Image (cartoon, rainbow, N blue to C red):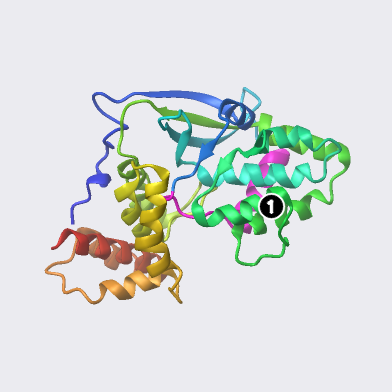
Amino acid sequence: MSLEQMSYECPGLHGPGTRQDIFIQTFAQVLERYPKLIIPLFQRRYCWTEKQFEKWWNDVHHGKRNHLGLHSTGNVVVKPNQNQEPIIIDGQQRLTTTLILLISLRNCMKNPNEANKYIMNGEKYRLIPSYLDRPAFYSMIEKTENKIDGSSHQWKAYNYFDNKNRHLSAEEIEKMFYNAIHKMSIMLVIVMNDVNLGQIYLWLQEKSFFGEAALVHNASPGEFLAGGDMVRNLVLTAVANQELQSQEEFYFQHWLRPIEEKVTTTLTEFVYQFVQKFDFKHESKTEIVATQYLKDKPHARTNILAYARFNLSMSGD
């Protein structure tokens, strides 16, 4: 199997004709810079768990600071759309977590409007999550939904932060808020040239998914994609450069209603069982490597094989 996204250089990010503006920004600077941040449909849903919540809260509270007094959380890659609103290619989990933490702190602050100016842009939401994450996130801001929602990772994050905040004094709450927006930083990468958004995102996720380090150790605060996530994203990247309304129509018709709403297992297991129906002429290099080196890691092996075989089935081999 040949994956174009697996090359060392990503079309649109590297090579002749490419251009990025790259600079350090605190989360306050990012939220002040952009009235709206858009997480595209081909991004996975918010999926951080308590392991990541704990690390993030600790980093905000007492994490190491560099010579600038900042705690670096890695790259955030964006591409401005025709309205100069940034489409989030990489970094949506960190941005969403920061907003959820701000919401939880807002509800403990003497002056909640200090937080609201980063959460809202006037009467409009500053962050537009991926489609299925919008109801939980918006209700969290508006305080219109019960916080005990076991199906929502966003509400799990909120509940975790809320419980931690209860042990802080009013002064400590203000300090946490200050640290969250002024001491936590990113390397903001703004893609300036024309690109295929889907191709870039697939390149980033496949580098993470298939990289040797992904099979052994994850030093970043994030969560690796499951095979089912990558298959969904592969399908949705076909319309990644279209208008948001067209993307959502495609998503409803070809993925959400016929597949995701009806699957009774995990998406990865569904895809893995689906691709067993195909009679492949040969094994891809990815399958050979996964079979050889992941014998004692069946979950990781299933993730990789589900995606690799689906990709192979689409190629017609």
Horizontal arrangement in the rendering, residue 255 relative to residue 33 (left or right): left
Question: What is the total number of numbered labels drawn onto the structure image?
Answer: 1
Q: Position of residue 195 (x, y in %)?
A: 31, 34
What residue is at 32 percent from the left and 54 percent from the top?
A: 234
Q: For the point 55% across and 35% down, which residue is it?
A: 36
Q: Is residue 297 visible?
A: no
Residue 104 seen in render: yes
- Tell me where residue 223 appears, x and y as whole percent: 50, 54
Nearer the observer, 176 or 234? 234
In front of the other: 49 or 43 = 43
Q: Residue at x 32, y 66 (%)?
A: 306
Left or right for 174, reference 64? right
Name the amino acid, label 1.
Answer: Met
Quadrant into which the N terminus falls = bottom left
The magenta stretch spans residue 53: yes
The residue beneath circle 1 is: 140
Instruction: Report helix, strand or loop for mark 1.
Output: helix
Residue at image position (67%, 37%) is 123
**Image quadrant in which the C terminus is located:** bottom left
Q: Please provide percent x and percent y for residue 119.
A: 67, 38
Q: What residue span does the magenta drawing correspond to?
A: 41-62
248 is within the stretch colored magenta: no
Instruction: Please give left or right for residue 175 compared with residue 122 in the image.
Output: right
Q: In x, y percent, where is residue 227?
A: 37, 62
Q: Nearer the viewer, residue 42 or 159?
A: 42
The answer to which image quadrant residue 49 occupies is: bottom right
Q: Mark 1: few, some, or many residues within 10 Å (few <14, many ≥20)?
A: some
